[in-house]
Image: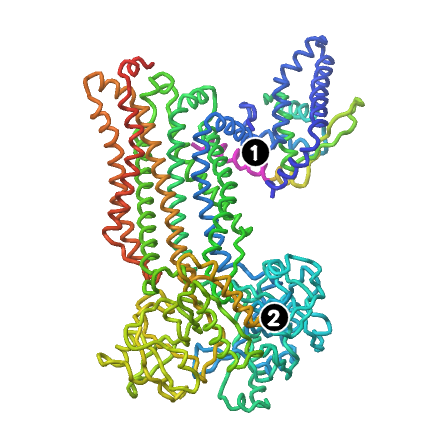
């Protein structure tokens, strides 16, 4: 359950959930999106993505289904479940609150 | 909720692990190749792109392994691994394993058996459909609160017609003369309503219950056998259905067999068969019990309609009763004064015959709980020693990365495994102990039975005890064993580093606790055995084992009063002439049986004494061994239509006449029962006659005069030494020759009767004896284990002492002193606890013997001797330590 130390603990789940909120993607595409969206600012070992995905499937936040990728190959697509959407909302709300509080402290003190 | 989803998802995954693995492979490969292609598009060479993709990805194997792990029940798999490891280590140390498992198994098994007995006797619901809706109907009278009478049949029929209950049944029990294959046998039959079995929802295991004809009012002589009677009398033969049996000479047809474990509403008594009561108003000459006279009273059971409460239905039934009492044609009921109906929950049945065992069982429960604690202390002690010996192993494992919790978990799994093994054995031990318990049930004119097979609830209890034992034996040793500082333990001389002082203190206090509990149990055993001995009566002549008892039941429907009196006289006369018979006589009740009689007797006018009463023939006192001390006994000439005579015991003579000579004085029944006076013709010695508990009561004996006929009399035959078996057969033959038509049953010796009337005390005595012994052995093993371990640990120290000139005696004393201090401490606490517990609990049990200094001292001495035996072996081993080799160690 240990995400790469470069990331705040637990945030990998949130990033993946957020990435999937606009539709199903396969694992590689998720990694790509996160890389591009963060402008390479986050150092995530690609390999750590898969245990996280599996854990989230076990928790019932995601569903995995095999389909055909853009380059016509078999790939597993992950899809957000209702449970996962709820999880995303609560996690991002918590995260925003956390960031706001930290920023407040950093600016005022 | 999420927790549940996770488990379901993991369980689903279980069957598709193979396809999952290849899927995962494909997925990871897809990722790497996709990334490499992307990098190639941005200008890298194929080889560079591939290696960069791999670098970004990180270790492939870990990604795959962690992904798989997400799906696994890691915790369970780890525990299973721990269990396998534990089993391996058990195989390596069989002595430890066997001792630990046996100690726990005996402790848990004893608790399971006693719990099962208490549960069965007090809490187990009847094996009938929906017992919670069953109620018993009684009628109370405002002028005598507390006293209830059973309702008259006419009212029950009225209630039935009103339809306010989901069915009603009357019940009445009596002894019947059962004939099949020519030999009469006395059985207990229950007369019940035709829809009794339907009301209770009890289905027959063979044949049917009462036929539809009988249930719709067309009475037929049908009988439903109980399971035990069917097994005992017919060997479980399924062809009995349709056969004819005779009850009091009236023919009945067997229609079915009720299921095993069903014994009606009265718990502990198993009626041999059930027959339907006659329709309202009819009677049967041969079986008075079947009669359905409207005014006759019956125990009555009703089933509440669903959704109604006892209170509601009590009110409804009561208004019904008031109407009935105003309008009934039975004049006596109309004029008897105010009455009210009372409904009481009957789902538990009536366990009156077994309640006397409640208090003893509770106390035994406390005793066996103590044994379990002693056993747990024992095993905990062994685990401490084991843990200390394995400190190195744990240190090594810690240094290669095993967390402390991981080690504690592993040790707890070991303890759990020990407890579970013990639990399995405990179920066997408990079943055996239960069958032992059943044998303590006293068997009088009504046979008591109770099904003490381990119930599911008891099995659950056993399991719970095993889990509790796991914590008791395992937690402290596990925490202690894993405390070790890695660096220190690995570096230092292991023999010196193991066993911190805190742990040593804890282990010593465990032994003190063991000694304490064992001594408490020993003293308790002493008290209960003493009680058993104190209550065993004297005054029944030498060797009550030679007095044979035959109970007879000449049915009143078949034998008139005069016939019964003649029959009894003839039996006594013929029996007395059998070779090997010293004396023979009959008593209606006789001493120490399951029936008794008491009357208010008046000597001087106005001066009454409550006394035990009995009706006997000539020869009874000689046969029972009760000594005459004045006057004469009854003779065959004291028969009907001669002067009324009576014999009293010393207490009665004193109570009635003080110091005056009782011979020739008169007494009579107080009140109007029988106004004629009896002349006192003899005095016998005081003996405890009906009740063994307490002092002998005043007692009077009468003959079967024309106002009193034998009902269920017992023949007492005193045989000469060594002739008991022969005399028994000869008496049976004599009774058969006289008349095969009346049953003879409950054949035993007077000594057997004594044992039956002491069943409670015997149960307490014998069980506490075994428990005390068990605790003693366990404490000895515990003490031995502690000392053996401590001697092994101090080998070096002992070696040095010897090298410096200590002699063997002082080494022996050094070890012995350690043990004796513990035993002394435990002994003092144990004695104090025993005295306190006795003060607290002795009032729970009537007639329990006092806790005497001799008994306490004796128990302490036994404890000390056993402790001495346990400490000798390790102490001698200490004496044999060779200084040279001890010093060369490590």
Classify residue B473 as left or right of residue B278: left
Classify residue B49 as left or right of residue B607: right
Q: Chain of mark 1?
A: B
Q: Chain of mark 2?
A: B
Residue linked to disc 2:
B303
Give above or below for B471 relative to B609. Answer: above
Sort mark 2 into few (<14), some (14-19) or many (20+) by Cα contacts within 10 Å: many
Sort mark 1 into few (<14), some (14-19) or many (20+) by Cα contacts within 10 Å: few
Q: Residue at x 61, y 42 (%)?
A: B4
Magenta span of residues = A90-109
Residue linked to disc 1:
B76
Q: Is residue B818 visible?
A: yes
Q: Residue at x 47, y 65 (%)?
A: B444
Classify residue B663 as left or right of residue B374: left
Label 1 close to label 2 by CB (< 8 Å):
no
Q: Is residue B316 visible?
A: no
Magenta span: predominant SS is helix
> Is B76 in front, or is B260?
B260
Give above or below for B390 relative to B635. Answer: above
> What quarter of the picture does the N terminus of chain B occupy?
top right
Distance in Å between CA atoms under marks 1 and 2? 49 Å
Give above or below for B240 relative to B330. Answer: above
Q: How far across and down, in percent of the image, does residue B145 sit?
A: 43, 79
Mark closest to the chain's N terminus, 1 or 2: 1
Per the image, label 1 sits on a secondary structure element best described as: helix
Q: How far across and down, in percent of the image, does residue B872 sit?
A: 29, 31
Mark seen at residue A44: none
Does residue B747 belong to the magenta stretch? no
Q: How far across and down, in percent of the image, does residue B45 sit?
A: 71, 8
> Is B435 in front, or is B376?
B435
Q: Quadrant of residue B493?
A: top left
């Amino acid at each position: 359950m240990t995400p790469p130390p470069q990331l705040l603990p637990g945030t990998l789940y949130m990033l993946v959930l957020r990435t999937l909120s606009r539709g199903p993607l396969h694992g590689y595409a998720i990694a790509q999106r996160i890389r591009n969206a963060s402008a390479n600012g986050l150092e995530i070992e690609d390999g750590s993505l898969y245990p996280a995905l599996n854990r989230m499937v076990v928790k019932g936040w995601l569903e995995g289904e095999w389909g055909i990728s853009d380059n016509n190959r078999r790939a597993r697509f992950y899809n957000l479940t209702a449970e996962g959407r709820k999880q995303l909302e609560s996690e991002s709300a918590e995260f925003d609150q956390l960031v706001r509080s930290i920023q407040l402290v950093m600016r005022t003190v | 909720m999420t927790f549940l989803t996770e488990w379901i998802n993991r369980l689903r995954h279980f069957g598709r692990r193979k396809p999952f693995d290849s899927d995962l492979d494909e997925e990871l490969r897809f990722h790497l190749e996709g990334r490499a292609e992307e990098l190639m598009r941005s200008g890298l060479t194929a080889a560079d792109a591939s290696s960069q993709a791999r670098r970004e990805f990180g270790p492939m194997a870990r990604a795959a392994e962690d992904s798989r792990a997400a799906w696994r029940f890691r915790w369970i798999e780890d525990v299973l691994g721990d269990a396998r490891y534990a089993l391996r280590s058990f195989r390596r140390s069989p002595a430890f394993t066997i001792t630990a498992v046996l100690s726990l198994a005996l402790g848990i098994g004893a608790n399971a058996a006693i719990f099962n007995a208490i549960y069965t006797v007090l809490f187990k619901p009847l094996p009938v459909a929906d017992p919670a809706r069953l109620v018993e109907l009684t009628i109370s009278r405002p002028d005598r609160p507390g006293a209830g009478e059973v309702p008259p049949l006419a009212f029950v029929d009225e209630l039935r017609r009103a339809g306010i209950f989901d069915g009603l049944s009357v019940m009445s029990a009596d002894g019947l003369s059962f004939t099949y294959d020519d030999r009469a046998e006395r059985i207990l039959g229950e007369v019940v309503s035709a829809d009794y079995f339907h009301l209770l929802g009890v289905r027959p295991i063979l044949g049917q219950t009462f036929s539809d004809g009988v249930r719709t009012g067309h009475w037929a002589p049908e009988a439903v056998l109980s399971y035990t009677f069917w097994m005992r009398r017919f060997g479980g033969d399924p062809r009995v259905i349709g056969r004819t049996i005779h009850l009091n000479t009236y023919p009945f047809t067997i229609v079915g067999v009720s299921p095993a474990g069903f014994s009606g509403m009265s718990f502990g008594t198993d009626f041999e068969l059930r027959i339907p009561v006659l329709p309202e108003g009819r009677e049967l000459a041969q079986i008075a019990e079947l009669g359905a006279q409207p005014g006759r009273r019956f125990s009555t059971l009703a089933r509440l309609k669903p959704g109604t409460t006892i209170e509601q239905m009590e009110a409804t039934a009561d208004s019904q009763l008031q109407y009935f009492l105003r309008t009934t044609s039975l004049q006596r009921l109309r004029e008897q004064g105010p009455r009210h109906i009372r409904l009481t929950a009957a789902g538990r049945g009536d366990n009156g015959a077994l309640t006397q065992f409640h208090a003893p069982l509770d106390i035994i429960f406390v005793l066996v709980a103590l044994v379990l604690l002693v056993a747990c202390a024992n095993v905990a002690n062994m685990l401490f020693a084991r843990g200390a010996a394995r400190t190195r192993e744990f240190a090594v494992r810690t240094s290669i990365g095993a967390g402390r919790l991981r080690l504690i978990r592993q040790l707890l799994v070991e303890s759990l495994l020990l407890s579970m093994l013990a639990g399995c054995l405990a179920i066997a031990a408990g079943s055996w102990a239960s069958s032992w318990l059943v044998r303590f049930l006293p068997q009088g004119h009504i046979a008591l039975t109770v099904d003490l097979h381990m119930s599911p609830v008891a099995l659950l209890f056993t399991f719970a005890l095993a889990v509790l034992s796991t914590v008791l034996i395992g937690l402290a040793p596990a925490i202690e064993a894993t405390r070790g500082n890695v660096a220190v333990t690995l570096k230092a001389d292991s023999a010196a580093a193991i066993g911190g002082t805190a742990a040593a203190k804890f282990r010593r206090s465990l032994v003190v606790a063991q000694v304490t509990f064992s001594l408490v149990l020993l003293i308790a055993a002493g008290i209960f055995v003493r009680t058993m001995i104190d209550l065993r009566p004297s005054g029944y002549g030498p060797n009550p084992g030679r007095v044979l008892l035959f109970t007879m039941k000449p049915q009143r429907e078949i034998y008139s009063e005069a016939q019964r009196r003649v029959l009894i006289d003839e039996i006594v006369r013929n029996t007395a002439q059998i070779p090997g018979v010293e004396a023979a006589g009959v008593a209606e009740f006789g001493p120490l049986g399951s029936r008794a009689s008491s009357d208010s007797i008046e000597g001087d006018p106005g001066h009454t004494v409550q006394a035990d009463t009995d009706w006997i023939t000539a020869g009874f006192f000689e046969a029972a061994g009760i000594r005459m001390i004045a006057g004469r006994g009854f003779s065959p000439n004291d028969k009907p239509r001669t002067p009324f005579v009576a014999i009293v015991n010393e207490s009665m003579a004193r109570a009635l006449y003080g110091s005056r000579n009782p011979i020739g004085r008169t007494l009579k029944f107080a009140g109007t029962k029988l106004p004629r006076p009896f002349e006192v013709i003899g005095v016998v010695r005081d003996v405890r006659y009906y009740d063994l508990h307490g002092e002998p009561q005043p007692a009077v004996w009468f003959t079967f005069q024309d106002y009193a006929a034998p009902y269920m009399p017992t023949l007492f035959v005193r045989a000469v030494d060594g002739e008991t078996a022969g005399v028994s057969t000869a008496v049976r033959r004599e009774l058969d020759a006289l008349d095969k038509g009346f049953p003879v049953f409950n054949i035993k010796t007077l000594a057997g009767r004594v044992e039956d009337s002491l069943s409670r005390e015997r149960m307490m005595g014998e069980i506490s004896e075994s428990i005390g012994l068990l605790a003693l052995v366990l404490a000895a093993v515990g003490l031995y284990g502690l000392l053996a371990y401590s001697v092994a640990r101090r080998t070096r120290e002992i070696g040095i002492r010897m090298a410096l000139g200590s002699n063997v005696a002082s080494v022996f004393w050094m070890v012995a002193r350690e043990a004796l201090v513990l035993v002394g401490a435990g002994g003092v606490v144990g004695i104090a606890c025993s005295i306190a517990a006795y003060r607290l609990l002795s009032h729970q049990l009537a007639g329990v013997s006092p806790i005497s200094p001799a008994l306490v001292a004796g128990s302490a001495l036994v404890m000390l001797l056993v402790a001495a035996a346990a400490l000798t072996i390790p102490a001698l081993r200490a004496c044999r330590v060779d200084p040279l080799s001890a010093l060369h160690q490590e």
